[in-house]
Amino acid sequence: MEANTRSTGRLPAAFLTPGSSSFMDFLAEHSPELLPGRRTLPAVQGAIEVPHGTTIVATTFPGGVVLAGDRRATMGNMIAQRDIEKVFPADEYSAVGIAGTAGLAVEMVKLFQLELEHFEKVEGTQLSLEGKANRLSTMIRSNLGMAMQGLAVVPLFAGWDVDREKGRIFSYDVTGGRSEEQGYAATGSGSLFARGSMKKLYREDLTEQQAVTLVVQALYDAADDDSATGGPDVARRIYPIVTVITEDGFRRLTEAEASDVSRAVLERRMDRPDGPRAELL
Amino acid sequence: MSTPFYVSPQQAMADRAEYARKGIARGRSLVVMQYADGIVFVGENPSRALHKFSEIYDRIGFAAAGKYNEYENLRIGGVRYADLRGYTYDRDDVTARGLANVYAQTLGTIFSSAGEKPYEVELVVAEVGSSPEGDQIYRLPHDGSIVDEHGSVAVGGNAEQIGSFLDQRHRDGMSLAEALKLAVQALSRDTNGSEREIPAERLEVAVLDRTRPQSRKFKRIVGRQLARLLAAREPATAPTDAVGDEAEGPEGSEE
């Protein structure tokens, strides 16, 4: 599988075959055992306990999109990790947040990042945002066998569409079904509560700063009602990961910035534990 | 069946080498050079889409002179090699030395196998380090040998002359504008010693810039930024004229 272990040391033919710009296609041809979807699982009784990532939220604002995630991974009723990172840059103009089986999801993201970078290097241009979203769809679908056995990966994909000049969000189901979300979206175990929260707080003219506050509020509400979602941990200085994608590209809020927003939200919740109140009519 | 003429192995290899060299000499020369903040690639290339230089991996760039279809094939092979290696191990485990080795084996095997046409290409694989001492430049001629170069290197038709011109004038710690101007000066000298002007729109320029905050250090310099660097009057006082991200994305944008 490594290029220079072949007898002559020269690049094997698969490396020099022109055609596909997809790294996954190349893997399928050259070393299919490295592709995540090709593994067969032994039949197991019941669900196996592995770390699961939980809530991811996203919202658009004029000028970009915000994607954020809490930091908790759970294994059954245990907290497996307090400071897991579940939001990753996919490339310069997009990011992906993952909910579901953590190990598989991280591997999927790694391959997805490489797929986009590989295409860009070979072709000299980036994939369109739709193209990227479709690639991710294919990857989730190839995990369907695992998903049926309880090892699902359900990401949320957000990015800046360079052609349409706006931020867009795509959500997925376990079968790879893709749908574009308008305004806001959430995935993972706390997504019900996060979505309810965002429904009341979202408006079309959010500034970037407000959009960041909105996702932190939504994550707080999710953590409030879902035991698998972690809230801001002030004592350990663990705050949600918040990323912003605008026409300037991907940016992850520094720890100081994330801490400021989280503390501001926390501060207001001291007076009003349920958070900001929406109009009745 | 008639008996084929006997050709001595020396003669056969010499013929193949000459065939390859002639092919490479038809291509235009290009220059790869160290400067204070990294490594700069400069070449004359009338095409905006068919590149002579490109990104292989985070810190590794690729330059080639000779036949386009052959080096494009090798380039994609290199990208696949690097991405596979980074995926199997870690991004830090992809090195220019490893890549140069694989290229050398590939070129060498093809060159010495009588059944295959030798590649008419000469490659440069460069890796930018975190400091100038860590920079690596490897030149790979058509026969699969590897030459570890320092400072500057020229490949292509007129390489020898350009190389010696550069050797005399290149020094460590040049600013990007200085290095770029020296490279253009070297490229615009004809074989007969006369000079011609190469307009900015016929130049292809790219850098591996160690000061770039992103992990991918490769960047094309195009359009206004290139014009500004070429117009820069005098050796800038500060050796660091950082490459601003005027054109977004590691690949830059064609203007």
Image: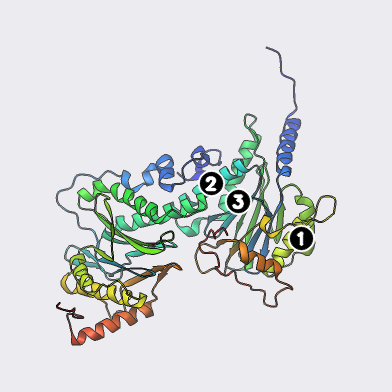
Q: Nearer the viewer, mark 1 or mark 2?
A: 1
**Helix, strand or loop for disc 1:** helix
Q: Mark 3 sits on what residue?
A: B51
Q: Is residue A96 visible?
A: no
Q: Amino acid at mark 1?
A: Gln
- Judging depth in this view, the residue of A151 and A173 nearest the camera is A173
**Helix, strand or loop for disc 2:** helix
Local packing at callout 3 (Cα closer than 10 Å; few below 14, some 14-19, many 20+) is some
Q: Amino acid at mark 2?
A: Ile
Any mark on residue B185, and which?
1
Local packing at callout 2 (Cα closer than 10 Å; few below 14, some 14-19, many 20+) is many
Mark found first going from the N terminus, 2 or 3 = 3
Local packing at callout 1 (Cα closer than 10 Å; few below 14, some 14-19, many 20+) is some
Q: Amino acid at mark 3?
A: His
Q: Is residue A61 visible?
A: yes
Q: Quadrant of residue A202?
A: bottom left
Query: Would residue B191 be found to the left or right of residue A63 on screen?
Result: right
Query: Would residue B73 be found to the left or right of residue A71 on screen?
Result: right
Quadrant (top left, top right, bottom left, bottom right) of the C terminus of chain A:
bottom left
Mark found first going from the N terminus, 3 or 1 = 3
Residue at coordinates 50% horizontally, 44% vertically from top-left? A3
Q: Mark 2 sits on what residue?
A: B76
